Amino acid sequence: QMLKGVLSYAHYLLNETVNTGELAIDATCGNGNDTLFLCKLVGEQGKVIAFDVQEQAIHNTKKRLAEEKRDNVILIQDSHVNVENYIQPGETISGAIFNLGYLPKSDKSIITKGESTVTAIQKILNYLKEGGLIVIVVYHGHPGGTEEKNTVIEELSELEQRDVSVLRYDFINQKNNPPFLIAIQKNKR
Amino acid sequence: QMLKGVLSYAHYLLNETVNTGELAIDATCGNGNDTLFLCKLVGEQGKVIAFDVQEQAIHNTKKRLAEEKRDNVILIQDSHVNVENYIQPGETISGAIFNLGYLPKSDKSIITKGESTVTAIQKILNYLKEGGLIVIVVYHGHPGGTEEKNTVIEELSELEQRDVSVLRYDFINQKNNPPFLIAIQKNKR
């Protein structure tokens, strides 16, 4: 009954969009929380492709998935800008999530950057089903965070409104730069 | 399944919050659409107090309510800054809605203003139940709209996060300054 928090709203939207048997993308798998969440949404017949540039993240996610006995994930230690190298011809993505910022409890100098984030989003949009969704949780309190936030907002504001709806979901009276959400949904024709 | 539009999301949130038998406020009744919506939410045992400074708006709303045979509305031709003059001692508000801007098909020079909007919001907050909600649909394409928008965002960003959550729900890739939503929910203790 209360307004959903940013993380809870991100999961709520994905849950409304991603169905059993579909393909979902975790663009920044980090400690594997969202990878596991997507895994449950697509089920045994579906597939998740999870990216991270850091070995530690891939390791943590692999461990997390093993604990939960999930084997429908392809884990890729590469930048999400190369996402199209890992999509099969004819495949369609139903949902994707980005967590912008740095890997929690890790090297804070290794951060996502605005331009590569936007490039990856544009590539995923090419494969997104109608009604499909990309959610971006924008952490921006760290050094470099403001620049990335501004780039992402500017670039995503330019996306054609015929093609996609870009929603900003943001609690504006909170201290300490909490994350906000951007949700991009591909319009139905 | 698609992302809800701003008006639809405003009604969705009020529907989640306002129950039968409660008191709701339409701070800007205009042509009566939201007054009627709130009427249905509170039902015969509830009450709606609807404000507008313009005679035309009161007239239109009265007509609309008569057509729908609704008689649980107190229509008040006065500024919503005087809201507390019309609340009985001990009464609690469960939900309120503001539509900022001018009355459609009417004199565009008669507009809501940032400072009085914020004053009225603060007064309503004093009477709001825990978990209660104020939704503000911010139209800002008209002359004076940008100033009001900026004042409202600045002032509401300063509300104490212990007391309330202030959410901005805004489609950022749309042309022609479409309205966005601010939703203020009183936290539970």
Image: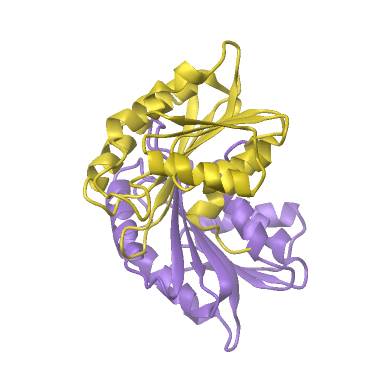
Chain colours: A yellow, B purple
> Residue at image x 47%, y 58%?
B54
Quarter in which the N terminus of chain B is drawn = top right
> Residue at image x 34%, y 42%?
B142
Q: Position of residue B121 (x, y in %)?
A: 43, 68
Q: Position of residue B133 (x, y in %)?
A: 55, 66
Note whether B148 is above or below A79 in the view shown.
below
Note whether A139 is above or below A131 in the view shown.
below
Find residue A175 and report its image quarter: bottom left
In front of the other: A55 or B171: A55
* Numbered disc total: 0
Note whether B7 is above or below B80 in the view shown.
above
Q: Position of residue B42 (x, y in %)?
A: 71, 66
In front of the other: B117 or A54: A54
Judge whether residue A16 can be spotted in this image: no
> Residue at image x 60%, y 23%?
A188
- Residue B105 placement, left or right of B24: left
In front of the other: B4 or B149: B4
Note whether B138 is above or below B73 in the view shown.
above
Q: Position of residue A72 (x, y in %)?
A: 64, 33
Judge whether residue A72 can be spotted in this image: yes
